[in-house]
Image: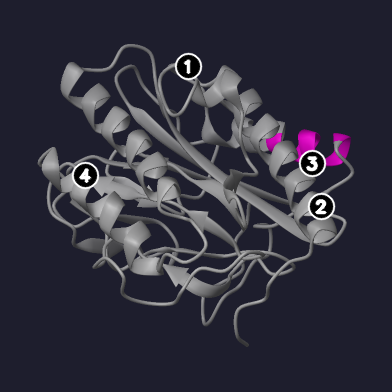
């Protein structure tokens, strides 16, 4: 299936699901502290899904030959890049970082977002990784304009991350989103300017830099979901759902209380 352009009404529905998703992400973030089990955060997400009258995008999700995903959130700690499975046995500790990835369906459309939270006090080096990764989302969004190409987004993310001495994951990427959680086009976090699919009004995409303190190679765990850096170095992950409109990009998962203004700390 090719790229599905959305109407104003459909974008409004994705905006509602995106706002519900980011409100849930904020609520989970408020509960992140040393000693909390990742399963407790999943419980918060399940309650919020019910409160919003939505459905989980992740629970039971089964792409390709993966087993069904068993939770409503992805909770990835430290060197885990994405797709960590929450568990009562998996508790975060002071100085950790925790990537929470969450998506929700409202009236048939998905809203998808992610944020990497510090657990208690983190080192200046770790804070820098989070700040650079978060800023790289907005570098990509600045290029998500009608007439530009997919490569412009990836190039902006890659250039910002690499200019600070980090690498971007190349084996995983962002994506189109709508009635399906994953739609065309793929949105890599690397690329060359003016290469790839041309961006058009009505496209809705998830831009989600995954930035590593070390190398870009990945390792998938035996659970067939959890994905870590191959070298065991830290990784951060941030994500916004973005609509490409005739007058520029609109962040459908915007939340100033969580993200601050244009990616700066709130």
Query: Gap in Å between the C-alphas at discs 4 and 3?
Result: 33 Å
Q: Nearer the viewer, mark 2 or mark 3?
A: 2
Relative horizontal placement of residue 79, taking residue 109 as reference (left or right): left
The numbered dot on residue 49 is: 3
Give the magenta-colored segment's residue range. Answer: 45-51
Front-most of residues 261 and 34: 261
Residue 259 spot, x, y in % from top left: 51, 26
Residue 211's place in the image compared with 259, above or below, is below
Provide the secondary structure element on which disc 3 rests. Answer: helix
Q: Nearer the viewer, mark 4 or mark 3?
A: 4
* N-terminal label among 4 and 3: 3
Front-most of residues 69 and 196: 196
Provide the secondary structure element on which disc 2 rests. Answer: helix
* N-terminal label among 4 and 2: 2
The question of residue 54 being in magenta is answered with no
Provide the secondary structure element on which disc 1 rests. Answer: loop
Residue 251 spot, x, y in % from top left: 59, 43
Q: Nearer the viewer, mark 1 or mark 3?
A: 3
Residue on which disc 2 sits: 13
Query: Gap in Å between the C-alphas at discs 2 and 3?
Result: 16 Å
Residue 70 spot, x, y in % from top left: 62, 57
The crowding category of the residue bearing disc 3, from other C-alpha atoms within 10 Å (few below 14, some 14 to 19, many at least 20), is many
Residue on which disc 4 sits: 161
Tell me which corner region of the image, top left, top right, bottom left or bottom right, holds residue 130: top left
Front-most of residues 203 and 227: 203
* N-terminal label among 4 and 1: 1
* N-terminal label among 2 and 1: 2
Residue on which disc 1 sits: 33
The numbered dot on residue 133 is: none
Q: Are marks 4 and 3 in contact (CB under 8 Å)?
A: no
């Amino acid at each position: 299936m090719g790229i599905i352009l959305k109407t104003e009404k459909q974008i409004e529905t994705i905006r509602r699901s995106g706002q519900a998703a980011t409100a849930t992400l904020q609520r989970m973030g408020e509960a992140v502290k040393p000693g909390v089990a990742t399963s407790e955060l999943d419980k918060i997400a399940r309650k919020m899904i019910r409160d919003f009258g939505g459905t989980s995008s992740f629970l039971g999700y089964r792409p390709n030959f993966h087993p069904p995903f068993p939770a409503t959130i992805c909770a990835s700690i430290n060197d885990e890049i994405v797709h960590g499975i929450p568990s009562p046995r998996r508790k975060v500790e002071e100085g950790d970082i925790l990537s929470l990835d969450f998506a929700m369906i409202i009236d048939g459309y998905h809203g998808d977002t992610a944020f990497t939270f510090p657990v208690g006090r983190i080192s200046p080096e770790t804070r820098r990784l989070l700040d650079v990764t978060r800023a790289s989302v907005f570098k990509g969004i600045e290029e998500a304009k009608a007439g530009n190409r997919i490569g412009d987004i990836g190039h902006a993310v890659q250039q910002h991350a690499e200019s600070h001495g980090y690498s971007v994951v190349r084996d995983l990427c962002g994506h189109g989103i709508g009635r399906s959680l994953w739609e065309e086009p793929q949105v890599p976090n690397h690329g060359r300017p003016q290469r790839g699919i041309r961006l058009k009004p009505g496209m809705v995409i998830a831009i989600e830099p995954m930035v590593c303190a070390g190398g870009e190679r990945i390792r998938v765990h035996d659970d067939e979901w959890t994905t870590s850096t191959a070298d065991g170095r830290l990784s951060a992950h941030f994500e916004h759902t973005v609509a490409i409109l005739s007058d520029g990009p609109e962040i459908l998962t915007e939340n100033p209380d969580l993200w601050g203004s244009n990616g700066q700390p709130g």
